[in-house]
Image (cartoon, grey):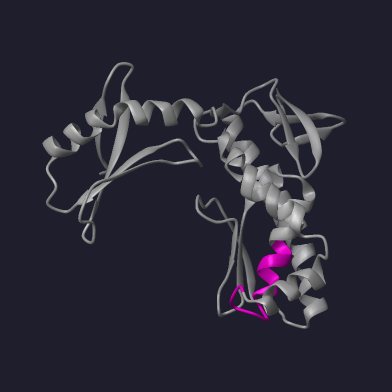
Amino acid sequence: MVESLTIGTPPITVELRRNARAKRMTLRVSGADGVVRLSLPMRGSLRAAKRFLLEQEGWLRAHISTAPARVEIRAGLTISLHGESFVLQTHSKSRVTLAPDTLFLPETRPMGQALERFIKTRARGVITKLAEADSATLGKPFAKISLRDPRARWGSCNSDGNLMFSWRLMLAPPEVLRYVVAHEVAHLREMNHSKAFWAEVASLMPNYTPPRQWLQQNGTQLHRFDFKTS
């Protein structure tokens, strides 16, 4: 069970993470999900943690006020999927249905859950097609593709040739997803971020700099969408 503390009015809930290597307390507000986390030494007391949080309350509230607002998945919400905008609505059918400018979700299931599954299905098709093309260009096959919802990275490639991508990239402009696929496939040849690696990325996507910058500047916005509570 995750330890937590609540301070102030209105209340702020802070997750406590004990770290065997920590020598002092460290406070962070996640840019991805807005969760407040306090890392503290294994033997750190709750009393000391609360005193520290009260001392930092002003700083903490200032950061929370600038964090992106969470967006609940609900009827009437307009969402962009791989460059196409859709208004979300519900219907009595059991399957997700696409119509011009409208995405109908089953009313018998939580909207966030249904939409997440739909996005994952579309993401797998789009990403697999791009990865296969890039892999063929480099002459370096990949082993498999997995889709996850990580907070700290958008994709990865391991030494076994397994590729991982965040399905939330479907919420970004298409060229951003295209860049991340090129980036991870390039790792099949260069497992580093050397000049040789970036040359491989450029060979797959010559104008990769703008989408890379977009992701650096706007990536946390993709985590605003809350698929769990709707």
In the image, is 26 to the left or to the right of 35? left
Looking at the picture, does residue 14 appear above or below residue 129?
A: above
Looking at the picture, does residue 61 appear above or below residue 172?
A: above
Q: Position of residue 158 (x, y in %)?
A: 55, 74
Question: Looking at the image, which residue is at 78% across and 80% down?
Answer: 138
Q: Position of residue 185 (x, y in %)?
A: 69, 71
Query: In the image shown, does 209 or 229 lie closer to the viewer?
Result: 209
Is residue 10 among what the camera can see? yes
How many discs appear? 0
Question: Looking at the image, which residue is at 28% across and 32% down?
Answer: 56
Question: Looking at the image, which residue is at 21% across and 60% down?
Answer: 20
Q: Position of residue 156 (x, y in %)?
A: 58, 65
Query: What range of the chain is rendered magenta?
Result: 181-193
In the image, is 47 to the left or to the right of 167? left
Q: Quadrant of residue 1?
A: top left
Looking at the picture, does residue 85 appear above or below residue 178?
A: above
Is residue 142 among what the camera can see? no
Q: Quadrant of residue 30?
A: top left
Query: In the image shown, does 200 or 146 lie closer to the viewer?
Result: 200
The residue at the far top in this view is 9
- For the C terminus, the image quarter is top right
Residue 192 inside the magenta-drawn segment: yes
Q: Quadrant of residue 60?
A: top left
Query: In the image shown, does 153 or 207 lie closer to the viewer?
Result: 207
